[in-house]
């Protein structure tokens, strides 16, 4: 019987352990925290966006970093396979906006419980509060796992320790150090999906303001567009966050970290209206409130909290009566509404990221098995790999699929 040690009790680790055991291996899962699935319980704001219901090329477009590496894992355990996996075990799913797949119960806890029970049913030994200190190799083959006060021999080991986001849940980058120590190259970890830091002070005054149905566009210094998205965003005490910002942050972060440039973010507050139509709307509102002070004439157009900021940025005298606003001033106001500019200077720290970009270089991993090309019997799965996707369930699917393939391969399946 193949002796397999899985290090890390996240989605990849729990899937890998159960699949290895199901394929006849004697499996022990080691988790340093007091319980498995801590980070998984937080995903999707506690609802757990399991995967995406997109198919084919549309699904693969959800991966920004090394998506091609996942073809082997996804062909063995696809998004539909994952949905069926949970359905077979009594957890129904539902497809919501953006083809995001959630458990019908809306509880990430239920997802963790299914994975936990699946391990127990397949005979996995689960050991929590157990700190691993490294990987022991002999020649070019795995020998065992170093733990506090001892050493555990094994035929195969699967490292699923995650990245460096949400360190309180156990993702503190331990696996990177172990992989590096035995010769693996680590692509420098950085925040993947993460809120963004703004340079303008006025942004902080909008803390707590959520904008719906806006369009955000990000540009490099040279004027080339990075990306664009439509939906909801949120102002914070440091800058901007919310669904579209998190979705865009991966590629924006690439520019911030690799090119060491600031990024220009432009918010179209009225994307449904052309400039011509919005100008007509402005004229109409200014006429309706012609005797009001300018600062009191934008109530029908903007959220109350945003009005003083727009008034200030427009340079128009706030006490001027609306009918006195000139055509040139109205033009400046129009540009603000269609291209409200925010300077993005940085991302928030990696500990606040939803997912980590970077990790174990996938060139050194066999995509057909998840086995190290450097050490026989050593496998990697999940966020520890240099693979990452956008929001929408892609990162969890990558964890489940690579975990499945690693577990089956480690057991000799």
Image: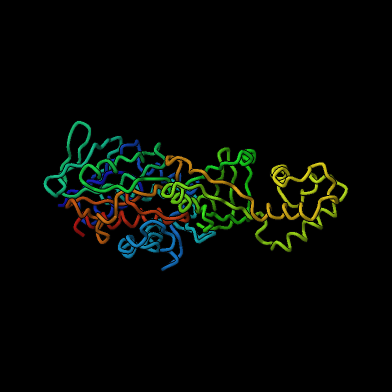
Residue 77 in the image: state x and y as whole percent: 33, 61
Depicted 150 relative to depicted 315: above or below:
above
Is residue 57 shown left or right of residue 133? right
What residue is at 30 percent from the left and 63 percent from the top? 72
Of the pair 264 and 391, the residue shown nearer to us: 264
Q: Residue at x 24, y 51 (%)?
A: 379
- Give percent across and percent down for residue 56: 41, 68
User: Farthest residue in the right direction?
Assistant: 291
Q: Residue furthest bottom?
A: 56
Instruction: Give the image's coloring scheme.
Output: rainbow
Quarter the C terminus occupies? bottom left
Q: Is 249 rendered above or below residue 205?
A: below
Residue 288 percent across, percent down from the top left: 85, 54
Residue positioned most to the left: 139
Horizontal side of 68 relative to 260 (left or right) equals left
The image position of residue 277, as x and y in percent, is 74, 63
Viewer-side residue, 391 vs 373: 373
Tell me the residue at 20%/55% (across/down). 373
Label total for image = 0
Compare residues 359 and 222 and report the one nearer the observer: 222
Describe residue 109's horizontal placement relative to residue 12 as left or right: right
Query: To which quarter of the image does residue 152 belong?
Result: top left
């Amino acid at each position: 019987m193949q002796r397999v040690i899985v290090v890390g009790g996240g989605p990849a680790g729990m899937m890998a352990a159960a699949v290895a055991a199901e394929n006849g291996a004697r499996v022990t899962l080691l988790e340093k925290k007091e319980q498995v699935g801590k980070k998984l319980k937080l995903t999707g704001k506690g609802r757990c966006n399991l995967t995406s219901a997109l198919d084919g090329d549309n699904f693969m477009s959800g991966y920004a970093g090394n998506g091609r590496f996942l073809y082997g894992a996804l062909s063995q355990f696809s998004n539909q396979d994952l949905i069926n996996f949970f359905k077979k075990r009594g957890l129904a799913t539902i497809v919501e906006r953006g083809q995001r797949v959630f458990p019908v119960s809306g509880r990430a806890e239920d997802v963790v419980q299914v994975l936990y029970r699946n391990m127990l049913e397949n005979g996995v030994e689960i050991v929590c509060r157990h700190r691993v200190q490294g990987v022991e190799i002999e020649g070019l083959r795995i020998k065992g796992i170093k733990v506090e006060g001892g050493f555990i021999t094994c035929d195969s080991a699967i490292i699923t320790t995650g990245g460096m986001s949400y360190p309180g849940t156990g993702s503190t980058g331990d696996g990177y150090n172990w992989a590096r120590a035995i010769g693996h190259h680590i692509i420098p970890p950085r925040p993947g999906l993460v809120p963004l830091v703004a340079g303008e002070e006025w942004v902080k005054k909008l803390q707590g303001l959520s904008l719906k149905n806006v369009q955000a566009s990000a540009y490099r210094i040279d004027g080339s567009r990075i990306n664009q998205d439509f939906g909801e965003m949120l102002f914070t005490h440091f800058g901007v966050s919310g669904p579209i910002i998190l979705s865009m942050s991966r590629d924006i972060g690439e520019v911030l970290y690799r090119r060491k440039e600031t990024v220009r973010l432009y918010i179209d507050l009225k994307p449904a209206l052309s400039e011509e139509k919005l100008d007509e709307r402005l004229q109409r509102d200014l006429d309706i409130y012609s005797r009001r002070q300018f600062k009191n004439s934008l109530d029908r157009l903007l959220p109350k909290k945003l009005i003083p900021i727009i008034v200030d940025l427009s340079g128009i005298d706030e006490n001027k009566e609306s009918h006195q606003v000139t055509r040139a001033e109205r033009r400046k106001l129009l540009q603000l509404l269609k291209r409200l500019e925010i300077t993005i200077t940085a991302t928030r720290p990696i500990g606040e990221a939803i997912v980590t970009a970077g990790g174990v270089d996938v060139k050194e991993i066999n995509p057909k098995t998840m086995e190290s090309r450097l050490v026989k019997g050593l496998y990697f799965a999940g966020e520890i790999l240099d693979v990452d996707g956008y929001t929408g369930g892609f990162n969890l699917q990558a964890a489940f699929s690579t975990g499945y393939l690693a577990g089956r391969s480690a057991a000799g399946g």
